[in-house]
Image (cartoon, rainbow, N blue to C red):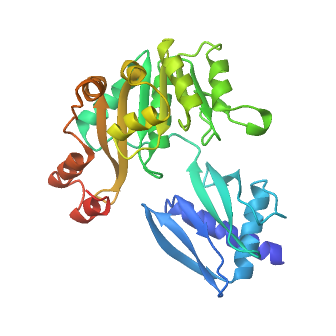
Amino acid sequence: MIYIDIKDKMTKIIEYAIKIKASDIHIYPHVSGNSFIKLRIKGELSKYEEYTNGELEGIISLLKFNANIDISKNKEPQSGRFVYEFDGKSYYLRVSTLPLNELTEGCVVRIFINEVEDVDYSIFEPDKDFITGLAKKNYGLILFSGPTGSGKSTSLYKLASEIAKDNRQVITVEGPVEKNIQSLVQMQINDKAGINYDNALKSILRCDPDAIIIGEIRDYKTASEVVTSSFSGHLVASTIHAEDSIGVINRLKDLGLSLEDIRQTVLCIISQRLVTLTTGERGLVTEILKKEDIKDYITYNKINNHTLPYKFNLALEKGFITFEEKEKWGY
């Protein structure tokens, strides 16, 4: 009976989160007593319902079981995922645990819908048209950047799917695969099996791809292989963490790439922020560095004036966002 009660509570939480399009479920028992489960909705954390610590620990254990995480371990971070079917659609739930003290642990569940989301590349028509046109390119490196939750993966999957529409072979390297897309050949990183970004990319180059999608550039080896793939005449797209488009160039440089390699291979850099529009919907404010902008910055230290602050001001002028939304992002 206790198991059924906990399962019902977990089901209720997950399905409510999906219905209201929450991106994350936060579950953190507190030693002082009862605690609220919180949901991240449109970038903001909101309280959901209050539960006893016993209930929360039961929910976390069940989530760990479903995600194939070792239930007996609560003193080290763990992660896993499972598929949840709801309302005729499949969702991937990524469960990440975090030890809080000797007795308890918390967890966050990130929700991914198993389909390419129909979100425009940008709220600005010229930017949207430019990014859409990138799917027609034959070679070069396309980079999406932004903080966690800025829609980088969504944009990357959308671009990959549009490239594949032209009857081109698109192979992805992901850690892990977040969405199973029929038109893509998807390869998952598995460190235990010795499959990492470095050797995966080398293997893919022998498999006749037209385009290669890399989940994220995190280190020199991955960055170097991405450049090699671009030089070999492939279209490559990936994500990278940086404050803005210029920050991406500096980040690649910090990872060990030469400015000449960056100048020759990078086709464009898109820095984006997922904002709440005045309509209540979500949209992307984008800053784009095109190839000529990248060359100007590297050669002459000249910066494109269509920066994120400029784009946020433009979005405000056009009535796309409120002043409060602009201020929230620090622009």
For image coordinates 51% across by 39% down, the residue present is 116
Up the image or down, 152 lies above or below 7; here it is above
- Quadrant holding the C terminus: bottom left
Instruction: Please indicate whether residue 266 sits to the left or right of residue 80 in the image.
Output: left
Up the image or down, 207 lies above or below 17; here it is above
For image coordinates 53% across by 16% down, the residue present is 210
Q: Residue furthest bottom?
A: 32
Up the image or down, 203 lies above or below 197; here it is above
- Quadrant holding the N terminus: bottom right
Question: 158 or 269: which is nearer to us?
Answer: 269
Instruction: Please indicate whether residue 148 sits to the left or right of residue 225 in the image.
Output: left
Residue 300, horizontal then vertical, whole percent: 22, 26
* Residue 81 visible: yes
Question: 5 or 77: which is nearer to us?
Answer: 77
* Residue 121 visible: no
Residue 196 in which image quadrant: top right
Residue 321, horizontal then vertical, whole percent: 25, 57
Question: 277 or 29: which is nearer to us?
Answer: 29
For image coordinates 24% across by 31% down, the residue present is 301
For image coordinates 32% across by 58% down, the residue present is 329
